[in-house]
Amino acid sequence: MERLRRALVARYGPDLGEEAHADAVAYAVADWQRISAMDNPVGYLYRVGQSRLRRHLRRLPVRFELPAARHVQPGEWVEPGLPAALAALSEQQRACLLLVVGDQWSYSEVAALLDITKASVQTHVTRAKQSIREQLGVTHG
């Protein structure tokens, strides 16, 4: 269920992502026998979490805020403009980028989870990286 939590948090931010995860887990517990027999139970529960969030998404604007740099170990450096650059990405780009780069999921795993093609995941990751480079003023060469 940790993979499900990471995926929902990557897509919807820490607050809504955790709420969607809790809703999906509660749903899974109630019907585990049927869900555990599925080919892709995590993907199914991801959709359950998304569906449960619709009531919130209709009322609240989705605002992605990165948590404080709690994953940064002493001595590590993080680009100060990175949180704003990530927040400026589309939800789909951010989810794909964080899952592929941050959590080392394969393109195929992300595609199955988000119910999109592997090529779409690759496109979202490539565009997200390019957007971040542009926002941070990174040039090649």
Image (cartoon, rainbow, N blue to C red):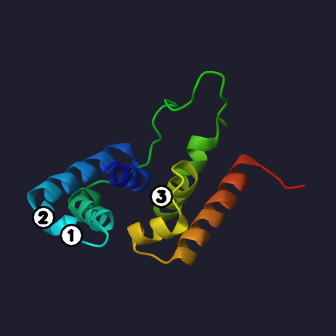
Closer to the eye: label 3 or 1: 1
Describe the element under mark 2 as helix, strand or loop. helix
**Marks 3 and 2 close (CB-CB < 8 Å):** no
User: Residue 115 location in percent, x, y?
Assistant: 40, 74
> Is residue 106 visible to us here?
yes
Separation (CA) of disc 1 from disc 2: 7 Å
Under tag 3, what secondary structure?
A: helix
The residue positioned 41% from the left and 49% from the top of the image is 63
Quickly name the residue at label 1: 37
Left or right for 100, reference 141: left
Choose the circle earlier in sequence order: 3 or 2: 2
Q: Which quadrant would residue 80 be assigned to in this image?
A: top right
Q: Residue furthest right?
A: 141
Residue 141 drawn above or below residue 38 = above
Disc 1 crowd, CA 10 A, few/some/many (<14, 14-19, 20+): few
Q: Amino acid at mark 3?
A: Ala
Identify which residue, 16 or 10, lies in the foreground: 10
Q: Quadrant of the C terminus?
A: bottom right
Q: Residue furthest top?
A: 74
Expressed as whole percent of the image width and height from the top left, the position of residue 29 reads 13, 54
Q: CA distance from mark 3 to mark 2?
A: 29 Å
Amino acid type of disc 2?
Gln
Q: Is residue 61 visible?
A: no
Reply above or below: 69 against 96.
Answer: above
**Direction left: furthest residue:** 30
Please tell me the numbered disc located at residue 33: 2
CB atoms at circles 1 and 2 under 8 Å apart?
Answer: yes
Q: Report the side of 97 relative to 33 (left or right).
A: right
3 lies left or right of 54: right
Q: Which residue is label 3 attached to?
A: 95
